[in-house]
């Protein structure tokens, strides 16, 4: 289905003003297109790009022209007009339609969040006179605890990559970095050569919303990175990837061609080492982030520090790890204390 000027404008807002990640922006775009498809099917309207563009421009140019777009009892003539004139009675049947598709609660919550963001933006821009989502409640989700693995399992995973060649050293350095810092895999592949502060034993991370933070590097991770970098600089295949001209934007972790790794490549490498170490194949790069946070809290780190290290905007996002840590403490207590359980 063709996109609409109004949905294209919203997508640009997400990317350029809200600084959404490409993945999140794609998800929101897909959710909004699904809403458009529903309106098209329900109204039996054929999308004509010229008419949609004209409707969007009239709404963008004049607030007074908004009412004029709805012609008497005929109602809206374009999908753009239908979107802008939508009320709660338009949204609720769409959500009922979605609920029949057997989406998970998390997916439903994201689709509702998409519409909330869209109508908040549309109302602010003067495209919609009211925000219909103010009358829509988000269904309560069951709280899922993040998955974490044990320190012993982490050690087995980190020991899996070989040390004989540059790519093996790179993989060891990447895994060490993920566990040492708790950064997201998107943040890992986004690291540049100059983001590494060797004297300060830290990394500069560009997180969600393009917010920057400094995270400390543990001695094991730093040693693994140094060994990997020594290998890159000694290998003629990679001789030019960190030269003086390219160093400013050169990736820290390079692929076999000297370019930037993708998140998918990191996932494939992790899958390989999970098999070699005999670990659960469902472990993901994000599992190392969960494990990082859980192990810090298990060993006495305060919640605010963990929040800052993870780059969470809200403390409530970080608090989910306290439940996991408490759960572990309870299990250890039940297993160890002679009067913990009823006989």
Image: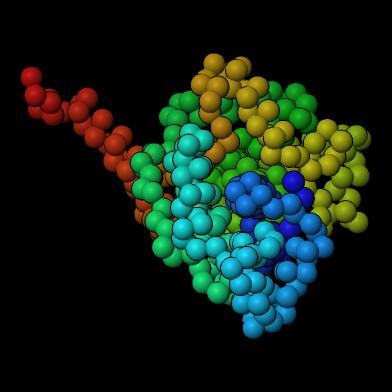
Tell me the residue at 75%/63% (across/down): 52
Q: Is residue 294 visible?
A: yes
Please name whichever residue, 31 or 326, is drawn nearer the observer in this view of the structure.
Answer: 31
Q: Quadrant of the C terminus?
A: top left
Where does the image place residue 81, in percent across and percent down from the top left?
A: 65, 65
Side (left or right) of 195 relative to 176: right
Specify the color scheme.
rainbow
Where does the image place residue 59, in percent across and percent down from the top left?
A: 69, 74
Side (left or right) of 291 relative to 68: left
User: In this rendering, is residue 30 above or below 236?
Assistant: below
Tell me the residue at 8%/24% (across/down): 342
Please give the count of numbered marks on the rendered protein: 0
Tell me the residue at 46%/60% (across/down): 88
Q: Is residue 217 visible?
A: no
Tell me the residue at 70%/44% (across/down): 189
Quadrant for residue 340, please give it.
Answer: top left
Where does the image place residue 220, in percent across and percent down from the top left?
A: 58, 39
Side (left or right) of 64 relative to 307: right
Quadrant for residue 60, please give it.
Answer: bottom right
Please name whichever residue, 65 or 6, is drawn nearer the observer in this view of the structure.
Answer: 65
- Determine the residue located farthest toward the front in the rendered image: 73
Please name whichever residue, 114 or 186, is drawn nearer the observer in this view of the structure.
Answer: 114
Where does the image place residue 129, in percent across and percent down from the top left?
A: 55, 74
């Amino acid at each position: 289905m063709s996109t609409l000027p109004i949905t294209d404008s919203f997508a640009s807002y997400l990317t350029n003003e809200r600084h959404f990640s490409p993945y999140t922006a794609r998800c929101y775009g897909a959710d909004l297109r699904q809403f458009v498809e529903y309106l098209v099917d329900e109204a039996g309207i054929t999308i004509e790009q010229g008419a949609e563009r004209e409707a969007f421009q009239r709404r963008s140019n004049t607030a007074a022209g908004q009412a004029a777009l709805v012609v008497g009892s005929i109602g809206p003539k374009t999908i753009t007009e239908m979107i802008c004139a939508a009320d709660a009675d338009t949204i609720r049947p769409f959500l009922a339609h979605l609920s029949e598709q057997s989406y998970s609660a998390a997916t439903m919550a994201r689709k509702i969040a998409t519409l909330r963001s869209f109508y908040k933006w549309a109302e602010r821009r003067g495209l919609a006179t009211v925000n219909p989502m103010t009358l829509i409640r988000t269904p309560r989700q069951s709280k899922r605890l993040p998955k974490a693995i044990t320190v012993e399992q982490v050690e087995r995973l980190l020991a899996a990559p070989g040390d004989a060649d540059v790519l093996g050293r790179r993989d060891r350095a990447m895994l060490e970095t993920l566990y040492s810092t708790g950064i997201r895999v998107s943040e890992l592949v986004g690291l540049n050569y100059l983001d590494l502060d060797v004297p300060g034993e830290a990394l500069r991370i560009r997180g969600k919303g393009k917010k920057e933070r400094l995270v400390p590097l543990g001695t094991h991770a730093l040693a693994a990175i140094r060994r990997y970098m020594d290998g890159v600089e000694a290998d003629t295949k990679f001789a030019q990837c960190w030269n003086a001209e390219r160093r400013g934007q050169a990736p820290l972790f390079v692929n076999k061609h000297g370019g930037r790794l993708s998140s998918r490549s990191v996932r494939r490498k992790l899958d390989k080492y999970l098999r070699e170490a005999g670990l659960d194949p469902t472990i993901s790069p994000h599992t190392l982030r969960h494990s990082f946070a859980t192990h810090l809290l298990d060993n006495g780190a305060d919640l605010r520090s963990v929040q800052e290290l993870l780059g969470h905007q809200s403390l409530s996002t970080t608090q989910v790890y306290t439940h996991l840590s408490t759960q572990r403490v309870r299990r250890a207590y039940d297993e160890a204390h002679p009067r913990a359980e009823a006989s």
